[in-house]
Amino acid sequence: TYNFTFTAKAFDQYVNENTSGAFNFTTGNSSVAAYQYGNGSNASSFNEVLVGSSTIASYSTLNLSASDSMAVTVVPGPLYVLQVDPQSLTRKAGTQFNFDAIGYDQNGNRIGGVDANWISSNSSVALYFSGNGTNSSLFDAVSPGSAVVSAFSVGNPDINGSATATTIPGD
């Protein structure tokens, strides 16, 4: 969670700063920017909570019609965790497994479009078919048994995730 501060200043019609007033602050979306403290002063602090957009508004305590606002967009940080979804799949031999790589930053915000390279721990059970360099993969269900399917981030192979693929006899 990150903290950010907004400062408001008031000016008269001649653009001279008026330092005698104070301000109240509001957020348009508290799930993105949560008010922390500062009403009644010239600065207010907000915590970033989730990825998204909000508007921060300030209102003069001397003249409520004197206000201004600013758009705030919180974006995810760098890739920190890679998960494979679903965590386990069971398929009959002769069909296919489909897995997706889902990335998260260190605050748990989902990151879209994470590209991965895919491998299987046992190609006689789950044979790689397609998807390297993308966030989605296909594996052929070959013969009965279990295999670990792993996704390695294209940008940082040290960040990876895995799931279990189980093949059962076909019809």
Image: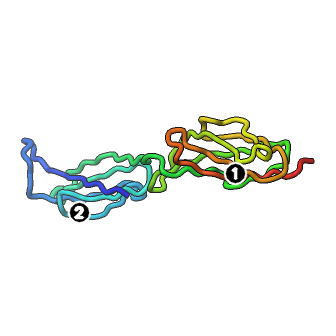
Q: Is 109 left, or right, of 169 in this rendering?
A: left
Q: Which mark is residue 148?
A: 1
Rendered view: 79 above or below 45:
above
Comes first in the chain, label 1 or label 2: 2
Mark 2 = which residue?
A: 38
What residue is rendered at 23% in x and 60% in y?
A: 24
Rendered view: 12 above or below 5:
above
Give SS at disc 1.
Answer: strand
What residue is rendered at 48% in x and 56% in y?
A: 108
Question: Furthest residue to the right?
Answer: 171
Residue 69 at what x, y percent from top left?
28, 48
Amino acid type at mark 1: Val
Q: Residues within 10 Å of mark 2 (few under 14, many from 20)?
A: some
Q: Is 1 left, or right, of 68 in this rendering?
A: right
Amino acid type at mark 2: Gly
Residue 20 at what x, y percent from top left?
8, 58
